[in-house]
Image: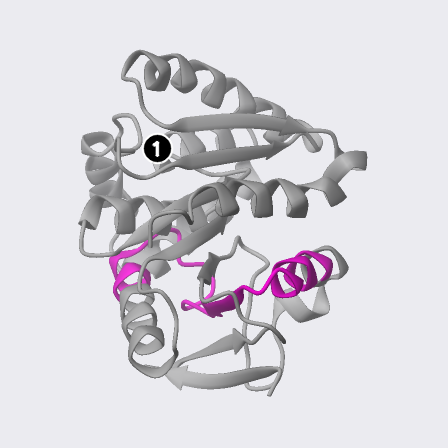
Amino acid sequence: MESRNFKLDTEWSVIHYPERPNGFGILTIGDERHFVNSESSFWTQNEGKRSLLNILKNEGYTVFYSNLYGRHWGSEKAVELTMRLCSHIVRNEILNTSFHVVAEGMGALVALKLLANGDSKIRSLVLINPILSLSAHLEQEKENKFFYKKLVAELEAAYETEISKLLERFDDDSSSPAFNKETPVKIIHVLSGNRAYKQSSIIKELSVEWEKADLPVTVSYVLPEKVLQVGSQIVRFFTKHEQVL
């Protein structure tokens, strides 16, 4: 069986099986275009994602992910479902119980909450063009009224709360991302488009703090034409953190 689609709560999830399993699982948490339905997913339909999925499977990784209520923006509901998905995988698959995580864009918001939770065993974490702070992201989107209004509507739907209350919460949470000394993190920033360049300047500032705090966070910048190299970068990083079972 190459893959299996199944439902948790109201949401579809999928698990992709490699031909020769290496015993390690990868949880992926997608960005705004991500989706899973009963038969398909963004990872199987998008050419770039499909090629990355094949690279990971060829290395023996079992890859799994959920639809996560669509544009979740790191909501508690999405975090809880992700934890349920991980528990389901631990119970039903023969895999090391400490997973690698690949999160992209808004998916980073869920990954950071999993990391802060402490119950989730994250072996290592790769963040691709991550949104690390919702308050910073909102501030950035204010420049374009249409995108800002759309983002506000999505946030209110995801968090089931009005924006004024959310803004108070985001201000309280606006400190640096909760990385720790135990979990190695690799941030891969693909420099395509204006937004990516703006986010890269936020990451450059933060990386000075991470270095001072002696946190195991590395940042690499990738030009759009070199995006196919991302798969091999991820595999190299994960392999480095598989010595301790």
Q: Identify the amino acid type marked 1.
A: Ser
Residue 71 part of the magenta-drawn span = yes
- Left or right of 191: which side holds 78? left
Q: Residue furthest right?
A: 225
Percent from the top left, x then y, of residue 109? Answer: 37, 46
Which quadrant is home to the C terminus?
bottom left
Looking at the picture, the colour scheme in use is: one colour
Quarter location, residue 208: top left
The N terminus sits in image quarter: bottom right
Left or right: 229 in relation to 134: right
Q: Position of residue 80 (x, y in %)?
A: 25, 64
- Count of numbered circles on the image: 1
Q: Is residue 105 visible?
A: no
Residue marked by disc 1 = 135
Q: Is residue 70 visible?
A: yes
**Residue at 54% across / 71% down in the picture?**
21
Residue 227 percent coordinates (x, y): 73, 40
Tell me residue 23's x, y (percent). Answer: 45, 67
The residue segment tinted magenta is 51-80
Is 77 colored magenta in this rendering?
Answer: yes
Judge the density around disc 1: few (<14), some (14-19), many (≥20) Cα neighbours within 10 Å: many
In the rendered image, the vertical position of residue 27 relative to residue 193, given as above or below: below
State whether residue 113 is above or below residue 5.
Answer: above
**Residue ID at (27%, 64%):** 77
User: Residue, x 50% and y 76% (percent of image)?
Assistant: 15
What is the quadrant of residue 3 in the picture? Answer: bottom right
213 to 134, vertically: above or below: above
Question: Which quadrant would residue 88 be assigned to in this image?
Answer: bottom left
